[in-house]
Amino acid sequence: MPLQNPQSVANALGDRRDIEDFLIQEAALLDERQFEEWRDLFADDGRYWVPLRPGQESPDAECSLFYDDRAIMQTRFERLRHPNIHSQNPAHRTCHVIGNVVVDEIDGGRGEVLVKSNMIMTDYRIHVQRVFSGRVTHRLRRTGNGYRIVFKRVDLINCDDALELIAVPF
Amino acid sequence: MRVLVTPRVRMVQSDGHPMLEMLGMKFDAGALHSLVHRERVHRSLYLDPEMFDLEMERIFGSTWIYVGHDSLVPKAGDYITARAGKQPLVMSRHTDGQVYVIFNSCGHRGAVVCNEDKGNAALFRCCYHGWTFKTNGDLDAIAMRRGYGESFDVSNPALGMRRAPHVVNYRGFVFASLAGNVPSLEEHLGPAKDSIDELVDRAPDGEIDLGGGVHKYVFRGNWKLQLENSVDMYHVPFSHESSVSRSGRQFSRGEGQKGGSAISDRGGAAQRWEQRVAWGARSNGHGYAGHQPVAEEMPDTPTFRAYVAALEARHGKERTQEILRPKRHNTAFYPNMTLQALNQHVRVIVPIAVDRTEVHVYPIRFKGAPKDMNDGFVRHLNLTHSAASLIQTDDLECFRRCQEGLSAQNSDWVWFARGVDTDKEDEHGDYVNHGTVETQQRAQYAAWLHLMSAGE
């Protein structure tokens, strides 16, 4: 249904409760290991980025923990589904908590919103439970099928520490 | 969280010799020789904390170790922190333009002076009593100097952040030795030096840049597991099985490549892997494996053509072809650095404890190459060697399982016997072989024994 005026476009785009619901559902897909469905939340040109340094400006000039487009996600998740992926025998279990959701910018012209949130993810595998936390930035695009992720950046507070192996995105 | 406890090493009956009680024993040359044979080494090398302490002293505290790359400290006052075994170091660029390796410890009460991974400083200043040091380690000033009286000799070099006894910068790779008496770096590196030359020559400007960030991972295992693995071509079809698609190839490792390595334990792919060279220096532990077949596939992209043109402008067509011809895949510089040509990186092994190791992985960018190409090197290393990557995570899982499994009492030994009967010796007495052999690991343990028993 076409929207009537710019103000209502902005309201519909930037409804915080809708966006929070979307972020919670997104995280649930990861915890349920529905990786392909998670990938499908990304726009065709979508990117998922986890930098390795606080304040890192570029995913090209410096290396990153993750910097995935949809093609890389495809390769990553095919491998996670491989019957002989030793690092997932047994698999990591994860639990995300999403909070402090703030709609930071609304771009009615592009139909996009910039959202800031905080994330805590615990993961567990073979007697070891870890806690990751960080600040998350989403750029979401409103489509006829709900929000699509154009860009997701996760700044872990320990991003420049030496980490044990990681399987599931944050 | 579970705490891994290193088990008490059991009594062993080795080759009919009397039983060895490892805990509390003196590691004399005879005892060490009973633990390391040409084709097998004793499991206590991975499990015994006292053995680890001795390695830090006799290996990391004596032979040449890699400290860092000079592109990480481009400007005067730039520094990085590093370690030689348990000893904290600083590598800094001083006002004279030279790179220095100094102990990261105040000459006064011993506190670590540089507390960050990297930074820039006009002077290093200790947090405790404010003593300051020049960026070459010399004492600059003692705070409230008068309180020491005239008899206190401020020219005593022990009051500074002392320099490592031997430091050599070879084409940007800075090596140091903390021992008084070592062979020259050139003599020490031997043919392994060519791996540095081959890589650096591929940069159109003749220099590489390691300033593209760093991947860091840690695993619950002994440092030697990573070093062995870096030149192990036998594990690939098994450890990395999940990275091979139904087509029999891995994912592409670079822009413009049709696919990744063809990997199998049988058929033509396996045969091609058996043709590669395996070399291990028996005297000092360095080793390399010949290039992966996929490295022969040069990308056909405008970026790559621009890169080749830049190389040709410097070297001419013929020399450029020789520079681009793949020769080596991975080279291990014993004991703490590896250099990989395919997923272009420098890897630094940082032992933390007998069952804990950190590894730092730096992407290599070529100075003078197109920006797109260097950006691609950085991005593709994320896929292969980040803590969340598609390759390195397989190895990390295997290291963890090795460390845990080695505590089992089914055997006293870890075996490196693959190809032992076909090892040849080259003119230097180093091991040469072909394919998926354990030749490089045999060389690593020959060097281990030599260093640990101080040549006895």
Image (spheres, coloured by chain):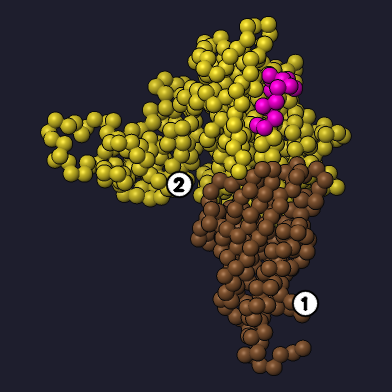
Chain colours: A brown, B yellow
Q: Residue at x 60, y 35 (%)?
A: B4
Q: Residue at x 66, y 35 (%)?
A: B399
**Horizontal and vertical percent for residue B402?**
68, 32
Q: Which amino acid, mark 2?
A: Asp
Asked whether, in this view, residue B376 is left or right of residue B176, the answer is: right
What secondary structure is marked by label 2? loop
The image quadrant of residue B264 is: top right
The image quadrant of residue A21 is: bottom right
Asked whether, in this view, residue B347 is left or right of residue B408, the answer is: left
Mark 1 and mark 2: Cα distance apart in space: 46 Å
What secondary structure is marked by label 1? loop
The image quadrant of residue B225 is: top right
Q: Residue furthest right?
A: B267
Disc 2 packing (10 Å; few <14; some 14–19; many ≥20):
few
Magenta segment:
B403-418
Q: Quadrant of the N terminus of chain B?
A: top right
**Horizontal and vertical percent for residue B227?**
61, 31
Asked whether, in this view, residue A126 is left or right of residue B122, the answer is: right
Tell me, yes or no, whether the highlighted magenta stretch contains residue A138: no
In the displayed structure, would residue B401 be above or below residue A79?
above
- Mark 1 and mark 2 on one chain: no
Q: Which amino acid, mark 1?
A: Asn
Tell me, yes or no, whether the highlighted magenta stretch contains residue B412: yes
In the displayed structure, would residue B450 be above or below residue A50?
above
**Horizontal and vertical percent for residue A91?**
74, 48
Tell which subunit mark 2 falls on: B
Disc 1 packing (10 Å; few <14; some 14–19; many ≥20):
few
**Horizontal and vertical percent for residue B422?**
75, 17
What label does residue A145 carry, if any? 1
Where is mark 2, residue-wise? B117
In the displayed structure, would residue B301 be above or below residue A1?
above
